[in-house]
Image (spheres, rainbow, N blue to C red):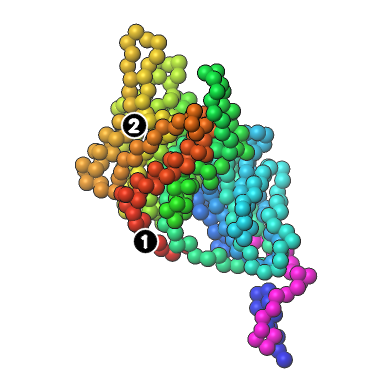
Amino acid sequence: MVCVVIGLTVAACGTPRPLPSQSLTWVSVPAADGRVRYTGRTYRSATGVVFSHPGVTIRASFWGDALRMKLHDAGLGGEVGTNYFDVSIDGAAPQPLAVHRDQPTYVLATGLAVGPHTVELVKRTESSVGSSELVALEVHGELQEPPARTAPVMEFIGDSITCGYGTEVSGIPQTPFWRAPTFTSAHQNPRRGYAWLTALSLGAEPVLVCYSGRGIYRNLDASTSGLLPALYELAVPDHAVPWDFSQASPDVIVVNAGTNDTFAGHGTTQYLPDEAAFKSAYRAFLQRLRTLHPRAHIICTLGSMTDGHKETEGTDKPSSVHVGHWLTDVVTERQRQGDVRVYRHEMAEQVPELDGVAEDWHPSAATHLKMAEALRRFIEAQLIPLPSPRVRP
């Protein structure tokens, strides 16, 4: 009788049976191996795969009973500088994992029944916390081919709101002097944000390109470097590596930007945003998106920390502006020029006394749910069905 080894099974007389766990060995699989699947922006380095945007997802299938990962992390540590991941094995509820720059190896699963398993890693924290570099997956068994990806992709471009800033905490303002808690990286979770929730409700895969405090023509601190249109060109913010736009384009793009342009300028003569500057920058960004993604549906929204209205305070000549109206003007321009795949979605402002607020007065998880539901309904009304699913590498 001849028995042959196939992968990690022994075929005796045509009947496969698993090898005992004692026969398994540790195998290190480089992060750039084609069996390790990434959703979101990454780039290959000399030693691994680098990424930083929240929501970047790593998936793999393996046969065995344990799994580790080797990771280099650039986070500085502490309450605002520690990167977190969600780890899910075999579709179980995700468990948070804190990573540290001085720790190279992490146990993701151990003591599993010998057999087929899946792992999903989702980066919870954003680029301002620090980038991460996956070096390898170490399998007690063997890595296998993951299933093909067929869901349409929705890309969300924005600031801290899109990043899921503070979504793990919520408080109801009690008095005029009540203060919201400040940012801690442990409480950032894109899975509870409107972007993630909207995509999943439509059967799509979310990709987030976002950074707290960044705007279209000026940032929250009134600086003009590292603006969202510039960050969109990069694989990883603050890394001089361009994103490879030859990869498959997203089917739907949601741009939620302008909040920081609105809020910037406190205590300066530039307190009110500049209409010409904002419109020029937004107009150019929309044109760039259309050039890069000729067939994508582009939805322009703003919120929900503001609808774009801002007025001067404590002056003899009060005046006001409305960034939301400027955004509508730019979208209307494109539509009149024949771009039938660009849309203006108006997002309701948050109601803190009803739904609470997250850290630094950001939308709470309850508000994000409302945002996602409203955006889902808008998309269903405007362009459902989504583009037909297609197999993606």
Q: Is residue 226 visible?
A: no
Residue 108 x/y as whole percent: 68, 54
Q: Residue furthest top?
A: 316
**Point 58% across, 35% down: residue:** 169
**Point 59% across, 28% down: residue:** 181
Please tell me the numbered disc located at residue 294: none
Q: Residue furthest right?
A: 22
Q: Which residues are magenta?
A: 12-29
Q: Quadrant of residue 231?
A: top left
- The residue type indicated by label 2 comes to Gly
- The residue type indicated by label 1 comes to Ser
Which image quarter holds the N terminus? Answer: bottom right
The residue to which callout 1 is attached is 388
Chain-order first, disc 2 or disc 1 = 2
Magenta stretch: residue 131 in it? no
33 or 3: nearer the viewer: 3
Magenta stretch: residue 21 in it? yes
Residue 30 x/y as whole percent: 63, 59
Q: Residue furthest bottom?
A: 1
Residue 247 x/y as whole percent: 43, 56
Q: Are marks 2 and 1 in contact (CB under 8 Å)?
A: no
Residue 140 x/y as whole percent: 71, 64
Q: Quadrant of residue 317?
A: top left
| Label 2 packing within 10 angstroms: few (<14), some (14-19), many (20+) | many
The residue to which callout 2 is attached is 324
Left/right of residue 129 with respect to residue 377 in the rendered view:
right
Does dot 2 land on a helix, a strand or a loop?
Answer: helix
